[in-house]
Amino acid sequence: MGEFKTEATLVKRYQTVVTDTRGHGMVCDLPPEKGGYDQGTSAVELMVMALADCIITIYAVKAMGEKIDLKHLSIKMKANMPDGAPTIESFSATVTVKSPASEEACQKLLDETLKACPVGVLCSKACTMDIQLRYKE
């Protein structure tokens, strides 16, 4: 996929419907305290979700390529956007992996993932990122 297209249409107030290259769509909206109807995630929340998903997806792809069995893979992420800041300033996350593979092998996969995750590479150019591994045998 070398080119991505999207369309966004304002429905009412700050609520939009956004569709991707393949026709998948979702509703985005602001929370009530920002004047929205709280009918969907905001664009900034969507970016944080995209980063978390990208890390997990790329990790799974790399694990499959290395024939590393994953019994569990999840991520818990926080993004820090101070009041008045124009955008997110930092991300922190813990990637939890349960695998019969060694902790070293799982950490190597995470290191490789962070170099290859397109959303992560983009975010790391603008923000500090602290992504840690939580390994479970």
Image (tube, rainbow, N blue to C red):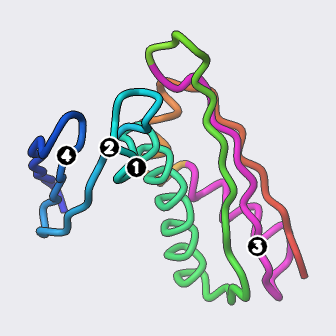
Q: Is residue 76 magenta?
A: no
Closer mark to the observer between disc 1 and disc 3: 1
Instruction: Indicate left or right for 109 with 135 as reference.
Output: left
Q: Amino acid at mark 2?
A: Asp
Earlier-in-chain disc, 1 versus 2? 2
Q: Which residue is mark 3?
A: 97
Q: Which stretch did the figure color magenta?
A: 87-114
The residue pinned by badge 4 equals 16
Q: Neighbour class for label 4 at 10 Å: few (<14), some, many (≥20)? A: many
As helix, strand or loop, the secondary structure at mark 1 comes to loop
Given contact means CB atoms under 8 Å apart, are the residues at marks 4 and 2 in contact?
A: yes
**Residue at 12% of width from left, 61% of height from top?**
21
Residue 92 coordinates in the image, percent (x, y):
70, 40
Residue under numbered circle 2: 29
Q: Which residue is mark 1?
A: 41
Would you call the spot at circle 2 few (<14 residues within 10 Å), some (14-19), or many (20 or more)?
many
Q: Earlier in the sequence, mark 4 or mark 1?
A: 4
User: Residue 81 appears in which quarter of the rendering?
Assistant: top right
Q: Position of residue 41 (x, y in %)?
A: 40, 49
Name which residue type carries label 4. Thr
Quadrant holding the C terminus: bottom right
